[in-house]
Amino acid sequence: MSPVAPSNNHVGRAAVVALVGVVVLFAVLGLTTLALKGRNSPDLRLGDQTFNRQDASDLADEIADRGPIIYGDVSGRKDRDIIVQHLGSDPDKGWTAFLAAPTDKARDCTWQWQRDEELFRAKCDRKLTAPADGKGLPQFKVTVSGGKVDVDLNADARKQASTTTTSAPG
């Protein structure tokens, strides 16, 4: 014989607790989905809109010595490795930034600088070439301000977001 009287409501209480837990779980998932819905939006401010902020003169000298610089994509998407290039003798002008691989090729098929030819060749297909300034490739806006180079990876996305219009049904 047990010194504690048996209770008849254990099953009912367990069902209520489980139901409340499921409702809370779905509420949290719903709020998380709403928060992440515009993840690729340029309005989501998780970091700087531009990157680099290197001294233009130093970076131009490095590119003149070693060639254009490849920056790997650290966004998690891994689809925007870029090349930063400088052409000319003025460190305030002549900057370009563009995708580091042909758009229809794998990420590891990077453009490789051919100093003697003054052009890029694709690592995976040496017949594929691109001009020294990357013209014709997806470009990123580069500015020099206060002697610092900035590459804006989201300029096009912000432009598209601000010029999006809707038409009335009809």
Image: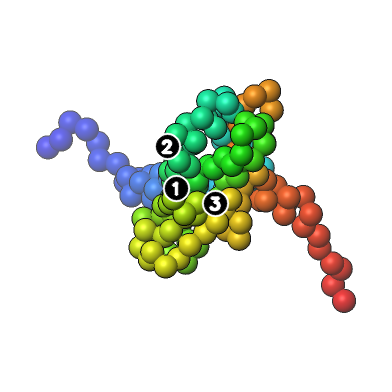
Q: Position of residue 100 (x, y in %)?
A: 47, 52
Q: Position of residue 19 (x, y in %)?
A: 44, 50
Helix, strand or loop for disc 3: loop
Helix, strand or loop for disc 1: loop
The foreground one among 129 and 169 is: 129
Q: Residue furthest bottom?
A: 170
Near mark 1 (Cα within 10 A), the count class, few <14, some 14-19 or many ≥20, is few
Q: Position of residue 57 (x, y in %)?
A: 57, 26
Residue wearing tag 3: 132
Left or right? Give the position of 40 relative to 145. Answer: left
Helix, strand or loop for disc 2: helix
Left or right? Give the position of 168 relative to 145. Answer: right
Q: Is residue 24 visible?
A: no
Q: Identify which amino acid the numbered label 3 is placed on.
A: Ala
Which residue does the image show at 51% across and 30% down from the upper left?
61
Earlier residue among tags 1 and 3: 1
Quadrant where the C terminus lies?
bottom right
Which residue does the image show at 77% across and 50% down from the upper left?
162
In three-dimensional space, the C-alpha distance between marks 1 and 3, rounded to whole angstroms, equals 9 Å
Q: Identify which amino acid the numbered label 1 is placed on.
A: Arg
- Label 1 or label 3, whichever lies nearer to me, is 1
Disc number at residue 66? 2
Residue wearing tag 1: 115
Earlier residue among tags 1 and 2: 2
